[in-house]
Amino acid sequence: MKQITDSRIFIAGVSILFFLMLVGGTEYLVSLDKGRLQAREKEAVIKEAGRVRNLLESEVNTTLNLILGLVIYVASKPDVDRDAFESIAQLLIRRTPHIRNIALAKDNVITHMYPLEGNEAALGLRYQENPLQWPMVYRAIETRRTVVAGPVDLVQGGRGFISRSPIFFSEGGRSYWGLASMVMDVDSLYAASGLMDAGSLRYALKGKDGAGTQGEVFYGDPTLFSDEAAVRLPITLPVGSWVLAAKSHRRMAFNKSVAILRAAGFGLAVVISGMLFALLGSLRRIRYLALHDPITELPNIRYFEAYIKQLITVKLYKDEPFALIYVGLDRFKSINEVFGHKAGDRVLSDAAKRLAAVVPERAQVCRMAGDEFVVVLETVQEREEAEARAEEMVQALVKPYSLGANNPVSLDAYVGVSLFPGQGVTSEILIREADLDLARRKGDRGDLSR
């Protein structure tokens, strides 16, 4: 009876464990699918919000660039008359529907206005005596660039952004004439960018007066800027920036397959997936072992041959050079003979780590055979730099190697350098040239034996 009871307990335990595995696997797949849904949703939001951002930035900056023509004209003809100004302003307004009016302020006093109708009260306005407008005017003068203020409520009705561009007589900016200002209609800009036709997205803008992330929210729901799920994109202005926040207001829906998976478990699918995962993991491990040296864990010669062919193809297409350094350890054989192969393997592993530690980020270290390595420096363009890198490798490799208590050993290291494409456009030629350079260096030190 006790055996039966124990058997039942064991079966119940295994069944519960298997059930928990199925539930855990199912929930894991559900979480993966939820993550994919969130990623796709965010990608869609970024794509659509990026389109709106690009349109809004383009509309604003294109409109701002129009005023530069007037700035250049006034800088060359400071005594601009009313007729010439009105002709230019009329032409500019025809180019875009966003401009409501254009003004000139000589010595920071508004002297020209187009259209004049409805804006007569603005003539004679002294910016320095207007505490609301003077800070942005002063900013434009100080930065000598166009600044955008607003949005502000307009006397004529509606809201607008006000751009102010300083005008200087000379290139050095020593002679200040005044300002060219322009009012851009807010609703027109928003409509042209698609901001008001949001579809499935909610938008908000912050950065009043070009203050960027530190500015006030001037469009949409302010809570979007505290929502971690919202996307935030910068809008660049000549001076300062705005920030666009966007988020979908649709609720994410799980796939029907996920709901079925959660309800039923699909135990067989979980088992098959686990088997497939194990199989793929085994294949990946086999591939890794086929392309990597088991002692140093560096890529081996088979990996190098595939890698260098691909790199040469890419570099030929981009017309970019790279350097190849052939590294050989001298007197390594004696370590195997005196201390044994395990000690030799330890030295090789240590040498590989030293090479990996001194090479730059975009470099590939491979073990070719025995005590020989190849280092490919993808970003090195000059031989002097390659020589310097090679010397660093030598200095790292000749330091004593520890084989236990009071058992340090030292090796010599030799390097050979070849440059692509100056010394060859195939891996065989590059290795041969580097090997010849290594032999020459060895000969220069009076040791021609390898």
Image (cartoon, rainbow, N blue to C red):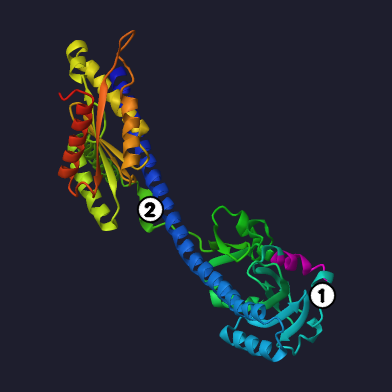
Q: Is residue 210 magenta?
A: no
Tell me if 325 is positioned left or right of 164 in this view: left
Return the mark for residue 15.
none
Local packing at callout 1 (Cα closer than 10 Å; few below 14, some 14-19, many 20+) is some
Marker count (numbered)? 2
Give the CA separation, mark 1 to mark 2. Answer: 67 Å
Which is more toward the observer, 11 or 331? 331
The residue at the point 29 percent across, 49 percent down is 321
Determine whether 77 is above or below 435 in the image.
below
Determine whether 61 is above or below 340 in the image.
below
Which quadrant of the figure contains the N terminus?
top left
Instruction: From the image, tell me which residue sits under label 2.
Output: 258
Residue segment shown in magenta: 130-141
First in sequence, mark 1 or 2: give its number: 1
Q: Residue furthest right?
A: 129
Can residue 110 be seen by looking at this rendering?
yes
The residue at the point 31 percent across, 25 percent down is 397
C-beta proximity under 8 Å, tags 1 and 2:
no
Predominant secondary structure, magenta span: helix
Q: Amino acid at mark 1?
A: Arg
Q: What is the x, y in percent for residue 384?
A: 34, 40
Can residue 200 be seen by looking at this rendering?
no
Secondary element at tag 2: helix
Determine whether 218 is above or below 121 in the image.
above
Instruction: From the image, tell me which residue sits under label 1.
Output: 126
Q: What is the x, y in percent for residue 332?
A: 21, 20
Q: Amino acid at mark 2?
A: Val
